[in-house]
Image (spheres, rainbow, N blue to C red):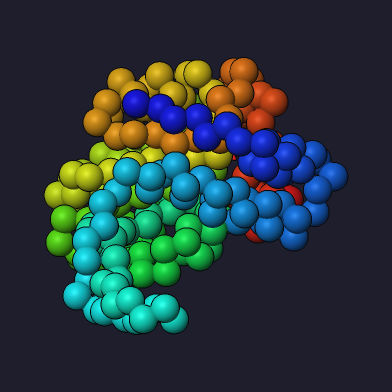
Amino acid sequence: MVTVVNHPLIRVKLGIMRDENTSTKEFRENLDEIASLMCYEVFRDIETVCSGETYQTPTGVTLDKEKLSHKIVLAPILRAGIGMVDGVKNMIPTAKIGHIGMFRDEETLEPHEYYFKLPVVDNPLVVICDPMLATGGSAIAAITAVKKRGYTNIRMLCLVGCPEGIAALEAAHPDVHIYIASIDDCLNEKGYIMPGLGDAGDRIFGTK
Ligand code: PRP
Ligand code: URA
């Protein structure tokens, strides 16, 4: 299933990110803010339970604090996924954070895993994040790696994708709900999303 999180605030911020003249600082800030806004949809249906911790309102009523019923594990795909971590963490400060090192070969576009570490948590909701879903290869490999370690409840949070990547990911992992801010037109001959926003990792970290 795919949810396109189509909201005017997100569209405005994404437009700033697409602009080639946007600075590294502004690029990061807008990605951060969009990641926070997207949490509204990603976590819309998760349940809460009463924590047993009571408090009193200024009007003298005693209430029980709610807490999320699932532990959340956030798993950015390195490097670019790191750019979405703070935005989600600001909304869910209790989230545990893992890291999935994945780079795609610039010639073959095949993904290569070089690092994997997720927190050991009982039956968590794992949210894998990566701003770019191009061929879908990196996301598919990351989800496969997460499933191999026994995690079953997985969601994918992206910023920009294209029909090719969405179709590939849905075919490989139909159980994983994809949340994305924009499905762009297509891939170009170098495997870049069009119109896209260029190389997300380079723009976040200023490496080009
Ligand atoms: C980018 C991006 C995704 C991947 C998407 O990472 O952040 O992980 O490409 O492409 P795909 O859907 O075709 O696999 P990249 O491999 O450039 O690594 P980086 O984030 O370290 O720059
Ligand atoms: N990775 C990126 O960072 N951008 C693209 O357009 C495709 C893959």
8 or 51, nearer to the observer = 51
Q: Is residue 92 visible?
A: yes
The total of numbered circles placed on residues is 0
Residue at 25%, 47% in the rendered image: 146
Q: Position of residue 12 (x, y in %)?
A: 73, 39
Q: Position of residue 107 (x, y in %)?
A: 54, 30
Residue at 60%, 48% in the rendered image: 34
Q: Residue furthest right?
A: 21
64 or 120, nearer to the observer = 64
Q: Give the quadrant of residue 112.
A: top left
Quadrant location of ligand 2?
Answer: top right
Residue at 40%, 34% in the rendered image: 178
Q: Position of residue 64 (x, y in %)?
A: 26, 72
Residue at 55%, 39% in the rendered image: 159
Task: Examine the rendered structure and indicate whether residue 43 appears above or below residue 11.
Answer: below
**Which quarter of the rendered picture does the N terminus lie within?**
top left
Q: Give the quadrant of residue 71.
A: bottom left
Horizontal placement of 123 versus 163: left or right? left
Q: Residue furthest front?
A: 59
Task: Examine the rendered structure and indicate whether residue 166 appears above or below residue 150.
Answer: above
Task: Examine the rendered structure and indicate whether residue 167 appears above or below residue 10.
Answer: above
Q: Position of residue 15 (x, y in %)?
A: 74, 37
Q: Is residue 85 visible?
A: no
